[in-house]
Amino acid sequence: MLKVINLYRKQGDFELKNITFEVRKKEYFVILGPSGSGKTTILDCIAGLRKIHSGRILIDEQDVTYLPPEKRNVAYVFQANTLFPHMTVFGNIEYPLKVRGIQKEKRKHMVIEIAKKLGIEYILNKMPREISGGEARRVELARALVINPSVLLLDEPLAHLDEPLKRELSLELRKLRKEWNIPIVHVTHDQRIAFMLSDKIALLQDGRIVEIGDSIKLFLNPRKVYTAKFLGFENILEGEVISCSDFGSVIDVHGIKFFVPEKAKESVKIGFRPEDVIIFKELPIKTSLRNIFEGRITEIIPQGPIMMLEVDVGIPIKVLITRGSLETLKLGVGEKVFIGIKAAAIRILED
Amino acid sequence: MIDKSLLFFLFFSMIITIILIFPTFFMLVTTPPQDLASATLDREVIAAISVSILTSTATTLLAIFLGVPFAYFLSRYEFKGKNIIDSLLDIPILLPHTVAGVVILCTFGPHQILGKGLRALGISLIDTIYGIIIAQFFVSAPLLIKTVKAVFDSLGTDYLKAARVYGASKIRVFFEIELPMASRGIATGALLCWARALSEFGAVIILAYYPYTAPVLVFIKFTTEGLRASKPISSLLVLITLIIFIILKRVGGGVRYA
């Protein structure tokens, strides 16, 4: 188990503050945040590569806060390729074992074993410059895991890979969790990767954890505007509460009234995903939808098989529909439409 | 249709080629072979070229030995005054070379502070091989240090971090990871340093007029016997340095990490 308690580090103007989380064995924890939010610094602190000014770090109940990197038994896969270019793949994977003074025969056995597990035994004699990007990532993982680490740290390990390879390797990372009985901490700015892999997510902004929790719960029910924006809530609106009861609140956003099944105070922000907005050509008569508005399509932006529409209902609302639906409904820019949003899909958000 | 942009660039390339490359080539082809042959057999010439190659090689080895750890220190550690040291390293490169000779003499001369210390150890810099080496070192080592520092800078600290996490001490990472990775850059720096040391004249002549190095001998021949006498030695020196340079570059260029 990895415990990070109230970690604080100051570096110039940047502060890493109140960083507290716990990752159990077999748990996949993702720290999600934009570049410059302090993700890598957290990993560096856990690995002992950067000093912390206060707080504690515990690995398997042992306080490692003041231990040097080599005494922490942490594996770290970096964003950049850090395979030593003057050593073969075998030499690279063997290096951590060599440093630890493990005997040659045993080293060889361990390298081959981990290489088999990651499916890279066929490139063991190659130099890093002779292997592909995906293979290089696997070798880095092998080099990290060969020491039987107590924690695995992954710093944007899929960042520089093309899409198909990214998908392939992320599936392998999922498998890792099952095979290795250790906590995994993965930092990324990619929310898709984060939700694909994680059990638990922390959202990081300017060196602080904005929100932390079970990834599905966080995905469905973010509490903060920052989290919501990061998780694909592209419609974030500010309005005034005009009525509030036990059933919910009515919120006025520039004259457009939204019903939200939550209690709210005077001035609030609400958010919903563009995929939770339904589009109609005619006003639906019999429907349970509480939020139906009339508007005009102002823009259609293709996003692969999906289309992002902007509909002006007095305020601009983003809507996602499939290309097929767009063609069936014969929608175009300037067209009059009705949009419906399920009340349950709208979240009240805090700043 | 003539490519006008090609003509534009060709024009400047021609001028630069005439100024930089043509004179050396012209000197080589206009030196009569019999003059070149007799220069090759001249004991004084052979002695001077030997002194030059020996001292510049010694200078380069000394620069690698002292300069590589220093370049690493400058690249990897942050401390107050780092930028000042970095700028001061340019001084030996910027100084007129005779001034560099005077500067060294002011410190290492027989009656000066460090010179006295060296004399106590039985080392004199005036008119000795040691004097030539220290003069060459003063003007050429900064080139190696600057080149090697740039190489360590370009490697970044990720490799260091990776090796540190896997348990290697900083000194072990330096010798096992970063030094081999920087080897090609170090070879380039050493080659620059060697070429600079070999060609040094101003600082050398202030400290050690004798034993003659090749550039000093060329100067003496020119001032005493004129252009015709200095040309064959110059051509011989050009040929030898070119051959060594090409060999070293090939050897150094063989190690390639991407």
Image: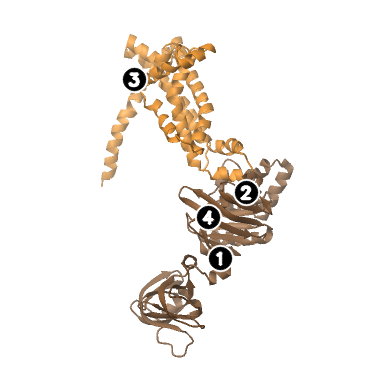
Question: In the rendered structure, the residue with mark 3 lies on which chain?
Answer: B
Where disc 2 sits, the SS reads loop
Task: Using a 10 Å C-alpha cutoff, classify the residue at mark 2 as few (fewer than 14 neighbours), some (14 to 19) or many (20 or more).
Answer: many
Q: Colour of chain B?
A: orange
Q: CA distance from mark 1 to mark 2?
A: 30 Å
Residue A45 place in picture, x, y as percent: 57, 50
* Residue at the spot 60% in from the left edge and 60% down from the top edge: A29
The chain drawn brown is chain what?
Answer: A
Where disc 4 sits, the SS reads strand
Question: In the rendered structure, the residue with mark 2 lies on which chain?
Answer: A
Q: Split into 4 quadrants, where in the image is the N terminus of chain A?
A: bottom right
Left or right, B181 with reference to A255: right
Q: Which residue is mark 2?
A: A65
Question: In the rendered structure, the residue with mark 1 lies on which chain?
Answer: A
Q: CA distance from mark 2 to mark 3?
A: 74 Å
Taking depth in this image into account, of A180 and A217 the one nearest to the observer is: A217
Mark 2 or 3, closer to the camera: 2
Q: Which residue is mark 4?
A: A17
Residue kind at label 2, given as amino acid type? Thr
Q: CA distance from mark 4 to mark 3?
A: 75 Å
Q: Mark 1 or 2 closer to N-term?
A: 2
Residue kind at label 4, given as amino acid type? Lys
Q: Which residue is mark 1?
A: A195
